[in-house]
Amino acid sequence: PSVEKINTDIVTLTRFLTEEQTKHKEATGDFTYVSNPTFTAKTNTSRLLCHALQFSFKSIAYYIRRATLINLTGLAGSSNTTGDDQKKLDVIGNDLFIAAMRSSGKCAVLVSEEEEEAIYFPEHKNARYAVACDPIDGSSNLDAGVSVGTIFAIHKLAEGSEGKKEDLLKPGTELIAAGFTMYGASAQLVITMKGGGVNGFTMDNALGEFILTHPDMRIPKSRSIYSVNEGNSLYWEEPVKEYFNSLKFPAEEGGKPYSARYIGSMVADAYRTLLYGGIFAYPADKKSPKGKLRILYECAPMAMVFENAGGQALNSKMDRMMEVVPDGIHDRSGIFMGSYDEIEKVKKFHK
Ligand code: AHM
Ligand code: MG
């Protein structure tokens, strides 16, 4: 490339968060924001948590890339809370994430898909955050080298709380930050903060940094792509069947049917949907009346990303996903998320 085309003013994730912080000085001491720039303790708080998150993404990406070479494919011989067989990488991803949160010193309570109970870090008295994560989402795809990802959601502890699971059993509207990293051809990090936009970063393996490559992501208002496991259609409720049929068999003469895209890794299906538009759905059905995906670390963080990018996310009762309050840390929900207009169509079919 010619010299003048090389970008030397690179925005790393760390730089991005620092600049956001100074932009929002007036905001409270949140995940990145500080109320008073001289109060560095708060600044450090958010940075430390963020550094720990970044490190866990980098190290999970590293092990996934090397899995086939270092005998990390296949099952670990154990199963998690919901009886899923754990892959060796599920176990490693979980351990890496827990270690990162513990060592940050800023996380008081952690819920992971791979752990039945919430994990507490009482040794960190100043920790003010509660984190939920799915360390490796889509792990059934791992051995085939298909994209998987890590999903995370961050709440602030309630005033006076030292960290309990109730700090996470809150609606998505109270999340202070959420996002996911997809380990694909490159590692892509998508992050959003309360009241903010959605920003996408690409891992530069040589620099070891996440670089801002997709600033202020907006999901297209509509696009003729649907993403759902059609193998479940026998069990779908009528409105769901009718909605998807309407995409495949357009009512108007000469209308063009939608394209189908389903990877079976929510992060990858969600990332494509965010960039290209369309809909991703995992509806509740007659076989799984509560749905498959988990509210705390799959549905709510994705809903926050989609809403902040201008899209919508609903559960199978057509409630706003962000307002759903789970009773238990591993509760499930049906979900429809995607382009604004596409979700409006889903609502029409449910009236
Ligand atoms: P996991 O967390 O055990 O990997 O399961 C979640 C995954 C999602 O990534 C994906 O959207 C869905 O399960 C696919 O399920 P199915 O194989 O039933 O289509
Ligand atoms: Mg998952």
Image: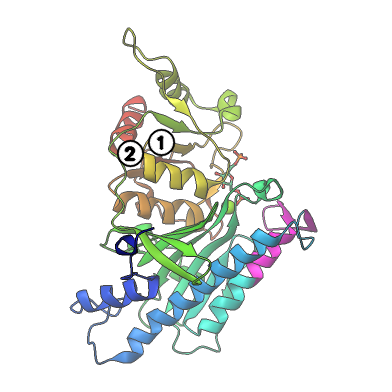
> Mark 1 vs mark 2: which is more N-terminal?
1
| Identity, as a three-letter code, of the amino acid under mark 2 | Ser
Query: In this rendering, is residue 170 above or below 157?
Result: above
Q: Quadrant of residue 345?
A: top left
Considering the image in quadrants, where does the C terminus appear? top left
| Disc marking residue 339 | 2
In percent of the image, x 61 and y 77: which residue is there? 99
Query: In this rendering, is residue 342 above or below 160?
Result: above
Q: Are marks 1 and 2 in contact (CB under 8 Å)?
A: yes
Where is residue 229 drawn, in percent x and y?
Answer: 56, 33
Spatial separation of the CA atoms under disc 1 and disc 2: 6 Å
Where is residue 276 drawn, in percent x and y?
Answer: 38, 39
Q: Residue furthest left?
A: 26
Residue 27 visible? The answer is: yes
In the picture of the structure, the residue carrying the numbered disc 1 is 279
Where is residue 9 drawn, in percent x and y?
Answer: 30, 71
Q: Is residue 77 magenta?
A: yes
| Identity, as a three-letter code, of the amino acid under mark 1 | Ile
Secondary structure under badge 2?
A: loop
Q: Quick one: 349 or 345, which is closer to the camera?
A: 345
| Relative horizontal placement of residue 106, taking residue 254 as reference (left or right) | right
Q: Quick one: 90 or 313, which is closer to the camera?
A: 90
Residues in magenta, as a range: 74-95
In percent of the image, x 65 and y 59: which residue is there? 65
In percent of the image, x 37 and y 15: which residue is there? 250
Q: Residue furthest front?
A: 2
Q: Quadrant of residue 110?
A: bottom right
